[in-house]
Amino acid sequence: MPGYIKKVLQQYKHEMPKRLQRSPYPVAKIKYGKAAQDPILEDTTRDTSDEEILKVQQVVESILDYARAVDLTVLMSLSTVATEQAKAKVHTTKTMEQLLYYMVSNPDATMRSCRTSTQMPHTPQLEMEGAEHVTTSSWDGCQKLGKRLD
């Protein structure tokens, strides 16, 4: 989906960040000692306006299919924004903006898969199909184990 993110960002008139964003989700500050076990405080920031809630919902809708198909790294942030969108607070809009900054910084994500050589378990199904050796790639093993035996 080359160029899709640029179109989405133009649609929402989102500007370039001052510096590149490498994380799609805001990272919590590190706490040491007893403070690390303190519960997470409830969000007490103000509620957002109806226009801001509508924008959050539109952004989630625009990015969801792209995230599922191409860029799985944004799903955690997108999930957080999606669950909070009905009662959005300022924190929700900041999370959405960080997600958009991340998308600006990484507009052309690609999904890559590779074959790895693994030791497949010795099963009767492989023997029935005439497998001569057990050491195959995991993809081959999944293909062989996934076939129906009639």
Image (cartoon, grey):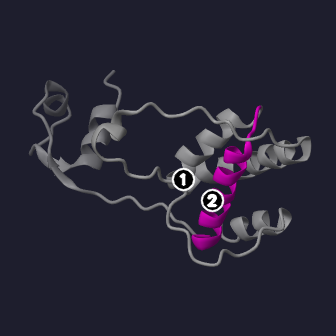
Q: Is residue 8 above or below residue 128?
A: below
Q: Residue 133: horizontal and vertical position, in percent?
A: 9, 45
Q: Residue 35: horizontal and vertical position, in percent?
A: 36, 39
Q: Is residue 37 left or right of residue 42?
A: left
For disc 2, the marked residue is: 98
Which residue corresponds to the image point at 40% horizontal and 33% vertical from the top-left? Answer: 38
Q: Is residue 103 left or right of residue 37?
A: right
Numbered label tally: 2
- Mark 2 is surrounded, within 10 Å at the Cα level, by few (under 14), some (14 to 19) or many (20 or more) other residues, namely many
Q: Which residues are magenta?
A: 87-107
Closer to the camera in the image, 54 or 29: 29
Judged from the image, the secondary structure of the residue bearing numbered disc 2 is helix
Instruction: Please say whether residue 94 is one of the residues in the magenta stretch.
Output: yes
Instruction: Please say whether residue 128 is one of the residues in the magenta stretch.
Output: no
Magenta stretch mostly in which secondary structure? helix
Q: Is residue 57 left or right of residue 136?
A: right
Hey, what amino acid is under mark 2?
A: Gln
For disc 1, the marked residue is: 25
Closer to the camera in the image, 105 or 122: 105
Q: Is residue 5 above or below residue 144?
A: below
Task: For the C terminus, give its image quadrant.
Answer: top left
Verify CB contact (< 8 Å) between mark 2 and mark 1.
yes
